[in-house]
Image (spheres, rainbow, N blue to C red):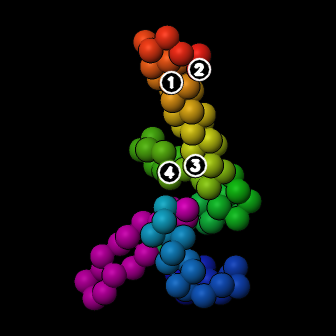
Amino acid sequence: MQQVGELVKVRPGTVRGWIRDGLLPAVHVPPPNGHTVRVRRADLVAFLEGRDPPPIAGGAEGPRTPMQRSIEARRRSAELLERSRQVRRRIAEGHGEDA
């Protein structure tokens, strides 16, 4: 995290937060003396450019980018709003009222 922080001119705590929040993919490697966190160069570049990180070896997908999470949240909000409208319509129809 120290090296990533120096590279992009932020404190290691900021990098730790990105990793903790799932914004920057990292691999936790427990060596014999201490704990090491590694960030793939391709993941860092994708994070800085706002792109999806490349797939992790073995076919697993990396975490979603902030943009992907924003799009998904907007879609979920729109779906919930539509369901709410449908429920209000059904209630109004059941009571003989207009929605």
In front: mark 3 or mark 2?
2
What's the residue type where badge 2 is placed? Ala
Percent of width and height locating residue 65: 60, 53
Q: Give the alpha-carbon distance from disc 2 to disc 1, as whole Å.
A: 7 Å
Q: Compared to 11, does 27 lie above or below? A: above
Q: Give the alpha-carbon distance from disc 3 to disc 1, as whole Å.
A: 28 Å
Q: Give the alpha-carbon distance from disc 3 to disc 2, as whole Å.
A: 32 Å
Disc sitting over residue 69 in the figure: 3
In front: mark 1 or mark 4?
1
- Which callout, 3 or 4, points at the residue further toward the start of the chain? 4
Question: Do residues under tags 1 and 4 come within 8 Å of each other at their CB atoms?
Answer: no
Magenta extent = 23-37
Q: In percent of the image, x 28 and y 88: which residue is there? A: 33
Question: Do residues under tags 2 and 1 come within 8 Å of each other at their CB atoms?
Answer: yes
Disc sitting over residue 99 in the figure: 2
Quadrant for residue 35, please give it.
Answer: bottom left
Residue lying furthest front in this view?
96
Residue nearest the viewer, comparing 21 with 50: 21
What's the residue type where badge 3 is placed? Arg
